[in-house]
Amino acid sequence: MTKRIHYGFILLMAATLLLSGCGRKEAPQMTNGSSVKPSLNELYHQVAGNVLELRFTLQGIPEGVGYQIDRTEMDPYCQCPGFWRRFDERLPQAKMVNSETTKLISLKTDKKAFLFRIRAIDATGNLGPWSKIITARGVDLSK
């Protein structure tokens, strides 16, 4: 009987781990309590060949704003985003406040769809909300 309980407990734990695998996969974010949050406005994106073009305007405190871009791939088991990893980051600068920024990202392959998200960060460490997820796949240019 103890073996049966032991196996039941193992199955319960395995099921819990499998079911909790999808969903939010990032650490909690700290803020310094400032009332002005940095923001990313007028986000535009398009794929041209094997390049993802992002165009946006950053707003925030006069001391400076920057941005963070994370990238992941679709998890094949749960069909949800995998673990997000920092792909690119631009440190906050005063000259980026209220100016349009363009970022070009090489997609390198047409075999995978990549997921991107972007957010603003200001000079005091405040983080803006993440953008909607942008899906991008390269194009096979040999055809």
Image (spheres, rainbow, N blue to C red):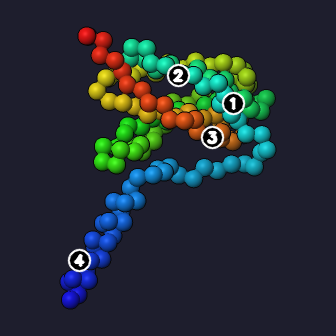
* C-alpha span from label 3 to label 1: 14 Å
In the rendering, at what x and y percent does residue 12 appear? Answer: 32, 72
Query: Which comes before the other along the chain, label 4 or label 3?
Result: 4
Residue 7: which numbered mark, if any? Answer: 4
Residue 4 x, y percent position in the rendering? 21, 83
Q: Nearer the observer, disc 2 or disc 1?
A: 2
Q: Earlier in the sequence, mark 1 or mark 4?
A: 4
Q: Which label's residue is closer to the chain start, 2 or 1?
A: 2
The residue pinned by badge 1 equals 65
Q: Image check: 90 left or right of 123?
A: left
Kindly identify the amino acid type of the residue bearing the numbered disc 4.
Tyr
Asked whether residue 31 is in view, the answer is yes
Determine which residue is flagged by label 2: 45
Q: SS class of the residue under badge 1?
A: strand
Tell me whether circle 2 and circle 1 mark residues in contact (CB < 8 Å): no
Estimate the spatial distance between the alpha carbons at disc 4 and disc 3, rounded to whole Å: 43 Å
Q: Residue at x 52, y 22 (%)?
A: 45
Q: Is 89 on the left or on the right of 42, as rendered?
A: left
Residue at image x 59%, y 28%? 90
Q: Residues within 10 Å of mark 1 (few under 14, many from 20)?
A: many
Q: Which residue is mark 3?
A: 129
Q: Amino acid at mark 1?
A: Val
Whole-angstrom CA distance, mark 2 to mark 3, is 17 Å
How far across and down, in percent of the image, does residue 116 sit? 48, 33
Looking at the image, tell me whether mark 3 or mark 1 is earlier in sequence order: 1
At 62% from the left and 23% from the top, the residue drawn is 56
Neighbours of disc 2 within 10 Å: few (<14), some (14-19), many (20+): some
Foreground mark, 2 or 3, reads: 2
Of label 2 and label 4, which has the lower sequence position? 4
Label 4: element kind: helix
